[in-house]
Structures are given as structure tokens and as C-alpha cells.
Image (spheres, rainbow, N blue to C red):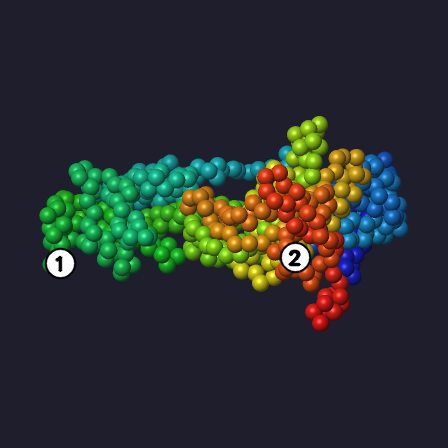
Amino acid sequence: MRITCCYRGSEKTWEVDEDDFVFGRAHEGSPHLLDLSPDKKISRVHARIWREDGVCWIEDRHSLHGTMLNNVEIKGAGKHKLRTEDVILLGDTTVRVESLDFVDVVAQTNYLELGEALTPDDRRSTADVNIAQSLDATNVDPVPAANIGDVGAQRLKLMCELPLLFAAKTELEDLLPTIVDRLVDLVSNAQSWALALRDPSSNELLLKAYRSQGDPHLSESLSRRAMTDRKAFIWNRAVTNDVSGTIFQSAIMTGMYAPLLWQDETFGVICAETRSLEQTFNDEDLRIIVFMAQYAAMAVGSHRLQERLRQESVISAKLLRQFSPKVAERLLKHRGSLRLGGERSEVTILNSDIRGFTKLSANMEPDDIVEMLNDYFAVLVPIVFAHQGTIDKFIGDAILAVFGSPELDAKQHEHAVRAAMEMQAAVEEVNVRRRSRGVPCAVPGIGIHCGEVVHGFVGTSDRMEFTVIGDAVNKTSRYCAGAGAGEVVISPEMHGRVWRLVQVEPTTIETRHEDNFAAYRVKSMKAEGSREETKK
């Protein structure tokens, strides 16, 4: 089957030999997929084409923006017969069917561009493949049983087991004792074994694991020397004149120290010592402990990297929930400076609240309510972000957004009004699609006010969130309450800032316990020419 796709003037032709495949945007775990990236209007799995009883069929797979076959919408209408010369419109991409002949090709069709997600492996059975010999990759014994009596073979076996052994330990508290236990097996002529890690904040050496026939021992001076010089060594009391008080007071006669080095970072030190004059260490023992220290450092470094990535993932998820990707990226770059606390300055606040939501949702299934909110939030939130706004919080069906924080924005007032007008237009588009599916529709009212507030990060260091506090927040809710479905109402303070940009009509917001509020209902944004005339 030959298909030509055209997106923004760029054409690509595929020769497809599969008799069942889908159009969409590539993602992990995607099926046999004709990738139509970078068209953002294409759903992950958008439409399907398949051959059945010698006939080719196409159907929309519940895509967001629908599928047009020869200018006829087929979303929700089941399967349709596909013919040569048919034109399919998916998002902003036009697909022309050049040929319906499914022919075998020598090479597998390359659906995805280089560097994108791979298509699944072929599904043909491997039952007829003759396996000559197999080995359990999770429990490899590098040394045949016949050679297990040899000391060198035993050491080789123990060292080859290290990667699998260390990888099975997901917590440092479990990993570090395991490292020392294996060190005991590798350097059995010692009487004391220890591992210490350097505290990155205080530079203090912390004893993390040890095995000893008496009290644990670790020389601070020898440990620091190994870490500073980045060298492993054997220390012998009988041939050294530089003996610290701690070493002198101990019964240790000889010992080996090796730093934990990985990617130019020193994590700590590992050592084996003995109190016996008969038990000494040789060059092979020193090489063993260096080898062990390198494996241990790699394991410790991997655990720390995973923890750092996990913490950054949590921070990133929180920032992306409230801030635009651009602002979140900047905050992540300076995450070390993110602190609990606030500052006082003027911001612009937008409050969007769906009119009649409580009554509307009373007769809806819970899943349908959540689906409806997600339909609206999916288009409203990106508009706030596009105009440099920040999502302070979601309150049921309401959105509270802030402009001018956490980063200053000289055009915060204009950005807030433009965002509000675009939000109302976007809701109308969503409602067109919802009406076509026969599901309930809703429209928000939006209020905007500006004023001085306290804004910043509150909570704890592990659960900090951005928020704004002040009378301006409460007043914004009043203007929002006075906005009808599909309306944008701004305060006089806002009107004084944006009067050159908007066409408005005065209105009054009545309150039960306060004086009535003067307000302005925004009818439209002024054209560029009329704005220039106003400035004159």
C-alpha cells in the first residue's frame, strides 16, 4: 500500500506492507504506527487502516480532532471503505491513498524517523528456533564447579557476582553492609573491615558499615590521606614513623585503605586491617580492595544519582503543575535558591469559574464530571501558561491564575486580559466538539483584578507550593462572581491599565454585605490601528 502525507508543504511517501496499522504520533509502546509527528493535532492513536476480506477499511480511533474522509467526518461513524485516490485529513495533515496493493518488501518498513521510539519487534513465534545452550542471566557462575577449590578462582567468582549482587540492593542501608560482607569474603586474612562515606555538606566521615572481631576501627588520618591523594595503599606500623594518636593507641598492625572514586567524585573510603603480625597484606590484596572500592563507588554513585533524579522529578512535576514549562525550566535551573517564604508586590489575578457547575454535575456520573473538567482544563491551562501566567490552584471547577509572579512581567495586565479572552474562545471550540458527541457543555465566567499581595512558596521543603495571599485575591473572586457565562469582567484598577487595549461596557456587581462594585465587561480586544489612534 502506498500513502503520501503532506504537512505544511512537506511531503513523505510510505510503502506499507502491513495489512493492519494505525496513524498517530509515536510514543512508547505504540502499535504498528505511521508516525505523523510533529502535527500536534494528531492524537497518539488517531485512525486505523486494515484489510478485511480483500477490502480496505478506515475508522477514526476516538481522536480528539476527528478524521475527514473525502471531506466527510467519520469520527464516531464506524468503519468506511477505502479506495485509491481517497483523501484523508487528520489534524493539519493530508493523506492521499496512491495504491491499495499490499506487497511484500525486502526490508521492514521504517515508520519512525531516526531517534524516535522503536516499533515493536515482530510477533512471529520463536518456538521453531533451536537453542543450543542457555544460561540464567540473573545468576551467572563464571567459574566451573571443578575449579572452585582454587583461591584465585574463588575470588574471581566472588568479584564477578558483585554487579548483580549490588544491583539487587535498592537502598543504601542494604547496599553498604553487603559491600562490607563481600569484602570479608575477598580479603579473609583481615580482622577488621569498614566502609565510611563522606558527608557532602559537612565533609565529615560517617561510618556506614563494618565487620570486626573487636571494636570497629577506622583511622581518620589514613582515610583522609587515601581520599585526598586518590590512592590506595598498605600501611604497616613497623615501617612508618608518622603514626597518629588514634593509630598508636589501637592494636592495628597493618591495614589497607582505598578511596571510593567514581566520575571524579570521592564518596568515601573502604579499609581492611589486622592486629596480627603474622597476617599481612600483599599486592594482590591491595588490587582486590581497589577493585572492590571501584565497584562500591559505582554502586553508591548510582544510588545517589537515582535519588537525585527522583527528587528532581518530584520538584519538576510540582513546578509543571503550577508554572509554564518555560518558567518551570528556569526555576529548576535555580532550584537551589528556591526557599520557603514570600515577597510583597503587585500582581494580576484571574479567576475562572464554570457557571452553574453544581447543578449541571448533579445528574452526571463521576467519570463524566472528571472527563468534562479535563476537557476544559486541557485547553485553559496552556493558554494561561502561553501568556506567562501561573496556576495558583484548582478549586473544583475553578482556576485561580496569577500574572507577574514568580517572575516580574511588565505586561502582566495585558497578558491576563488576552488570556481570559482566548480562554472563552477556546471553551466555545471545546463545546462544539462536546455537542457533536451529545454530552453536557459548560461555560465559565472570568474575573480579573490587580493589586498588592504576598506571593511565594509555602509548605515544607519537601512539599512547597506557590501561592498568593491578600485582599486582591478576595476581590478577584467578587469580579468573577459578577461575570456571566462566557463573560470577562475586570476591575476599575485593571481598566485603568488596559483601557487602550479593550472595548468595554460599564457594569455593577451587587453584593450582599458590601457596597456594590463598579466593574467593566470586556467586549473585545481593540484592533492594532484603533489602539494607535487612541495613543494619539
Q: Which residue is rendered at x = 14% and y = 50% of the image?
A: 247
Q: Is residue 209 visible?
A: yes
In percent of width and height, residue 263 lies at: 39, 57
Q: Residues within 10 Å of mark 2 (few under 14, many from 20)?
A: many
In percent of width and height, residue 223 lies at: 23, 53
**In the drawing, what numbered circle is on residue 82?**
none
Q: Residues within 10 Å of mark 1 (few under 14, many from 20)?
A: few
Inter-mark Cα distance, 2 to 1: 80 Å
Chain-order first, disc 2 or disc 1: 1
**Quarter of the C terminus within the rendering:** bottom right
Which residue matches tag 1? 242
Q: Which residue is rendered at x = 20% and y = 41% of the image?
A: 216
Name which residue type carries label 1.
Answer: Asp
Q: Is residue 111 visible?
A: no
In percent of width and height, residue 504 lies at: 72, 55
Total marks in image:
2
Q: Which residue is rendered at x = 55% and y = 38% of the image?
A: 132
Q: Which residue is rendered at x = 85% and y = 46% of the image?
A: 69
| Left or right: where 10 falls relative to 260 | right
| Left or right: where 71 falls relative to 236 | right
Nearer to us in this view, 229 or 434: 434
Report the residue that reaches farthest toward the bottom: 536
Q: Which quadrant of the structure image shows residue 396?
A: top right
State if disc 1 and disc 2 touch (CB < 8 Å): no
Q: Secondary structure at mark 1?
A: loop
Name which residue type carries label 2.
Answer: His
**In the drawing, what numbered circle is on residue 495?**
2
Q: Nearer the viewer, mark 2 or mark 1?
A: 2
Q: Which quadrant of the structure image shows residue 434?
A: top right
| Left or right: where 349 falls relative to 64 | left
| Left or right: where 463 falls relative to 287 | right
